[in-house]
Image (cartoon, coloured by chain):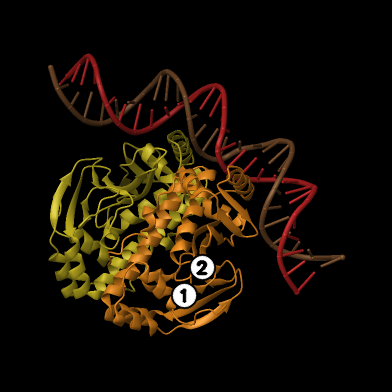
Chain colours: A orange, B yellow, C brown, D red
DNA sequence: CGCCTATTTGATCTGATTCAAACAATGTGG
DNA sequence: CCACATTGTTTGAATCAGATCAAATAGGCG
């Protein structure tokens, strides 16, 4: 399968939210992109770094995380094609967490100055990118609510609902099924659980026939009941509106 | 005590981060502001709302929260003078959570269009505001890590460290002491704990002589050991740098 | 095949919740 | 200025969701 060497996944993502003018699309296409293929489990940016570029996911799966002083890991988010997980580094000098690959992935690096120029030349795009980081924050809040106030069972169901919709938005769902390259330890660290408990809750989800999951492929068996189990309300993803910045 | 009727708390906050030009300061001062005094526990914006203005805290204490389907509450953040807790509504049409007062507070409403015009006229200010929402997100991540991976005791210590630094940045600390108008139930809902457990952990913090707390006033007894207890590293608050957008 | 990593299972333990009730504070109206 | 109501804090006891420890399976893959 051919992997894009252009910011095209970003364009596709933005166009799922808003319509782009010819000028805007052209400006995006002219972003300088230095493409790199990375193996699984490779750090891309680390805590304390002061990046001068952002990374756009072209293919694969990234995640953001932090290791706490006590040695525990917290995963903050998962990222797919079209995402710019470290867009924040455009305005926050020092990284306060890490970005890494979950599986072998292709990313494109875009220099900060190029993005800044883009924002000046195309203020509406600036708003759309800003908006993207705001959705990021909305997802953090939702995860926080899950970790703070939902059962393990509900948290996991919720995560699957979120991934399902986000992957669907970029066309990575077929037949209610998607690649889930996240280990149970990864799910545990994302949701504030232990591996053992994740394993047991997954078995419950399977037993309740909400999902099936083997070999890194997840199939939604009942979207209705999965959402219900996860108290899932997609509002926070702000996928809906084509009203723009 | 006289409460500002102008965006001056915002300016003070921004100037703690970066230097403003005369033009920028003037532009901020000319923001139309409709000031309102609110009693404690009043919702300012609600989930599902589609605001056409943002609210700037002039005085008091606000918080953001959400009620989950199961009836549980998650608090996402606390806000003090100079903050614009719902700045996100500038780019996200629908509110996915609520903003409310914790105590009687004075807020100033600024129409979205005025902020948009400001951003176009002063692109550097746009970056600074964007940056502000990114710090918001960084705080969410840190809370997520705490709720997911830290003990109750550490979470509470961490929260107090954060409030201490943020209040200090706007000059609301004197003699290691500050107003903490948050009930134990509030702390519980912010940190994913039960009220009872918060109460017991607070007693431990007092017993360890890290803090003293009565009548809504908190005094830090040992900043060193409080930070240590909370695994607190202030990097994520991005208070430091005067390097700008 | 053999190694390494992920999943699964079992047994035990504990941090934190829940329920229930007593006890301060703080405020309100008479 | 007191009596009452309301809201917040504290305490005790019982329980549980989820953690921890330890070991057995099961996949992948070079």
Q: Chain of mark 2?
A: A
Other residues around mark 2 within 10 Å, as few (<14) / some (14–19) / many (≥20): many
Quick check: D29 left or right of A109? right
Other residues around mark 1 within 10 Å, as few (<14) / some (14–19) / many (≥20): many
Quick check: A205 left or right of A22? right
Seen at 30% across and 64% down, the residue is: A242
Q: Nearer the viewer, residue A209 or A46?
A: A209
Seen at 44% across and 57% down, the residue is: B141
**Which x, y percent locates residue B205?**
46, 41
Q: Is residue B239 visible?
A: no
Q: How far separated are the C-alphas under marks 2 and 1?
A: 10 Å
Q: For the view shown, which residue lies furthest in the front direction? A: A175
Q: Is residue A153 visible?
A: yes
Q: Nearer the viewer, residue A46 or B175?
A: A46
From this view, report whether residue A109 is shown above or below residue B81: below
Q: Which SS class for mark 2?
A: strand
Q: Are marks 2 and 1 in contact (CB under 8 Å)?
A: yes
Examine the image and state in which quarter residue A126 appears: bottom left
Q: Nearer the viewer, residue B95 or B129?
A: B95
Q: Which mark is residue B197?
A: none
Q: Which of labels 2 and 1 is toward the front?
A: 1
**Which x, y percent locates residue A227?**
46, 47
Q: Which residue position holds label 2?
A: A99
Examine the image and state in which quarter residue A92 appears: bottom left
Q: Quadrant of the C terminus of chain A?
A: bottom left
Q: Which residue position holds label 1?
A: A55
Seen at 16% across and 65% down, the residue is: B114
């Amino acid at each position: 399968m051919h992997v894009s060497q252009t910011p095209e996944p970003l364009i596709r993502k933005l166009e799922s939210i808003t319509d782009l003018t010819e000028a805007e699309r052209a400006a995006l296409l002219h972003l300088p992109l230095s493409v790199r293929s990375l193996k699984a489990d490779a750090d891309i940016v680390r805590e304390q770094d002061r990046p001068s570029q952002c990374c756009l996911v072209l293919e694969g799966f990234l995640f953001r995380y932090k290791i706490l002083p006590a040695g525990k890991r917290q995963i903050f988010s998962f990222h797919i094609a079209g995402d710019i997980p470290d867009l924040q580094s455009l305005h926050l000098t020092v990284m306060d967490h890490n970005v890494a690959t979950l599986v072998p992935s292709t990313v494109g690096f875009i220099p900060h100055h190029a993005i800044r120029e883009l924002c000046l030349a195309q203020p509406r795009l600036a708003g759309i990118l800003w908006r993207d980081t705001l959705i990021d924050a909305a997802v953090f809040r939702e995860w926080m609510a899950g970790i703070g106030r939902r059962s393990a069972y509900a948290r996991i169901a919720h995560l699957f609902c979120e991934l399902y919709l986000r992957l669907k938005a970029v066309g990575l769902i077929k037949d209610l099924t998607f690649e889930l390259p996240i280990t149970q330890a990864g799910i545990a660290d994302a949701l504030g659980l232990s591996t053992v408990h994740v394993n047991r809750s997954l078995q419950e989800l399977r037993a309740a026939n909400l999902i099936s999951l083997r070999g890194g492929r997840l199939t939604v068996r009942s979207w209705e009941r999965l959402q219900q189990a996860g108290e899932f309300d997609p509002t926070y993803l702000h996928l809906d509106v084509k009203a723009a910045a």
